[in-house]
Image: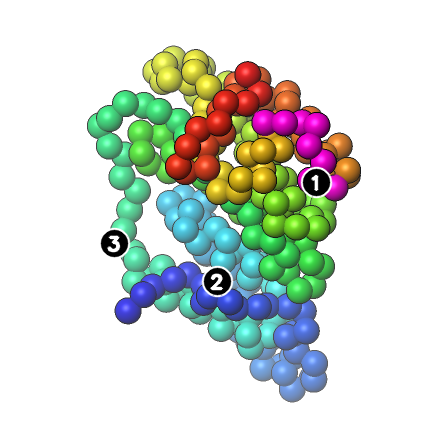
Amino acid sequence: MRILPMRHGIKLSKKQSPKTDEELTRMSDIPYASAVGSIQYVVQCTKPDVAYALRVTSKYQASTGEAHWGAVKIILKYLKRTKDMFLIYSGGELILEGYSDASFQPDDDDAKSHSGFVFKLNDGVVAWKSSKQATKADSTTEAEYVAASQVAKEVVWMKNYIQEFGVVPSTAEPIVIFCNNNGVIAQAKESSSHHLSKHILRRYHLHILTTQQLDRVLDGSHEINCLG
């Protein structure tokens, strides 16, 4: 049986919050906030695969409904079934890589998209985050572009932080970010392209342009030289 921290296609919203006094009373005994807090601790330590599910469920702590609690229980079951899985760091070359992704308008409450990134060092995950985007994207490409821009900013911090230790020589080279959207790669390569909304370009393209260390963008199959 396939194990996932969240069921595919699940939609949570404030509309699923309690609407009657009876529902409020019943849900008041549910340890929702405590469970979410425990999941958050695990995500921060060793479970990047649960970061998105945590992001989706954590916003309903003040108005928990049956559907919200059901989603949290699925996460807890997933954690129980995967408790023997752990992060592995191989003995190969110390190379830092970033992975960017986005979910286009999964939130029915405000129609905002989600960003996610993962950084791997020596083939093991060392940093991860799932967050809601501050700006409303009008397309999947725009959502992916915002996510890539956020990763570009993170690259600067990661390089500066790791270089202080002086044990990862590969950080002196450009850090590769993997992105699965060709539109994002084209926009990053050609700043005069206008496939994105002006408010997206104004706010986020500067972040990529000022990331001098980032001059390679990969889509998983081929390399495109850009921002050299």
Who is closer to the viewer here, 33 or 94? Answer: 94
Three-letter amino acid code of the residue under disc 1: Leu
User: 182 left or right of 73?
Assistant: right
Q: Residue at x 52, y 27 (%)?
A: 155
Residue 104 seen by the camera? yes
Disc 2 versus disc 1: nearer the observer: 1
Q: Which mark is residue 196?
A: 1
Three-letter amino acid code of the residue under disc 3: Asp
Q: Which residue is identified by label 3?
A: 84
Q: Position of residue 200 (x, y in %)?
A: 72, 39
Q: Which residue is identified by label 2?
A: 35
Who is closer to the viewer here, 9 or 51? Answer: 9
User: 199 left or right of 94?
Assistant: right
Asked if residue 228 lies in the magenta stretch, the reply is no
Mark 1 is surrounded, within 10 Å at the Cα level, by few (under 14), some (14 to 19) or many (20 or more) other residues, namely some
The region drawn magenta spans: 189-197
